[in-house]
Amino acid sequence: MSHTRMLIVPLVLALATLACSITVDLPTFNVETGPTVTDDIDVPLPPAGAVADVELVFGAGRLDISPGAQGALVAGTATYNVEELKPEVQVEGSQVRIAQDENRLRGLRNIGADVQNRWELQIGDAPLDLRIMAGAYQGRIELGGLSLQNLHVSDGAADVRLSFSQPNQVEMETMRYETGASTVTLTGLANANFADMIFRGGAGDYRLEFSGNLERDATVSIQAGLSNLVIVVPEGTAARLSVDGGFSNVDPSGSWRASGQDAYTLSGDGPELNINVDIGAGNLELRN
């Protein structure tokens, strides 16, 4: 290693340590609030045999999603006390869009702690593609036991915990998660039953846990900037991981073993996880 690289690496690691301590502060503004309103949301199941296409567009606030809609595709409530935060529900055949008007949201200024904006939604068990587009928000999302064929989450500065506590009921083609300067924890990922997973992050604190029942071989592509990234694969699960990142610090522990330059393996039976990590600078922890 050259002298220049020896000088750069400690600096990068120091910056990465700083990234580990990132706290996501949701933007605070002050706007005129009104009475608190709670709207019921009730979207019927799609026609028999159809795959529903559901898009949720949410601004800043609290978003809770869980299984359990009985006899409906999406059911729940939206609570808010600013008129511009009223959600619009559009249903066209098997296509569903529940969204806060983006043009009206752009016009808001000074959103403060007195503003209420919370969605509490349950999803039914019909086959569906789900997209969640959100801004600076706090999310608690449980998707276990659903029938997700594709999942796409995109958010800004967020604090999100997303889990699959039960196996996905169908084979998922692609799971995609894109985020910014956030704190994101994804658990039960083996239960998602995806063929491909793509994770894109900026400067943040990310934890990806591949717990659950891995039913088939799967490929995972992870790209992160100045961040702290923890990858957890349980012992007994076969996994291969490669790292592309000149100034990242890799810390393997447990049953992880180095296998050549910038490559690590985990012995196990059954299907295999193939994980490719591109981390610009930061800390990568491999755990069981």
Image (cartoon, grey):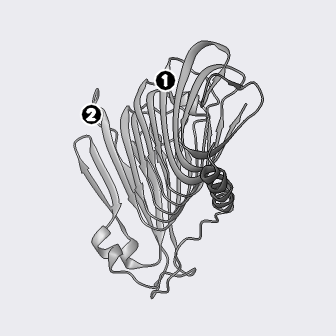
Q: Residues within 10 Å of mark 2 (few under 14, many from 20)?
A: few
Nearest the viewer among 206 and 228 is 228
Dot 1: element: strand
Residue plotted at (65% across, 20% down): 237
Nearest the viewer among 128 and 260 is 260
Could you tell me which quadrant the C terminus lies in?
A: top right
Q: Earlier in the sequence, mark 2 or mark 1?
A: 2
Residue at the disc numbered 2: 47
Q: Quadrant of residue 18?
A: bottom right
Residue 124 vertical placement versus 8 (above, below):
above
Q: Residue furthest right?
A: 254
For the residue marked with disc 1, what is the amino acid?
Answer: Ala
Q: Position of residue 22 (x, y in %)?
A: 64, 63
Left-right relation of 227 to 86: right
Residue plotted at (34% across, 60% down): 99
Q: Residues within 10 Å of mark 1 (few under 14, many from 20)?
A: some
Nearest the viewer among 26 and 206 is 206
Q: Residue furthest top?
A: 269
Could you tell me which quadrant the N terminus lies in?
A: top right
Q: Position of residue 220 (x, y in %)?
A: 49, 32
Residue at the disc numbered 1: 218
Dot 2: element: loop
For the residue marked with disc 2, what is the amino acid?
Answer: Pro
Q: Residue furthest left?
A: 92
For the residues marked 2 and 1, what is the alpha-carbon distance in whole angstroms? 31 Å
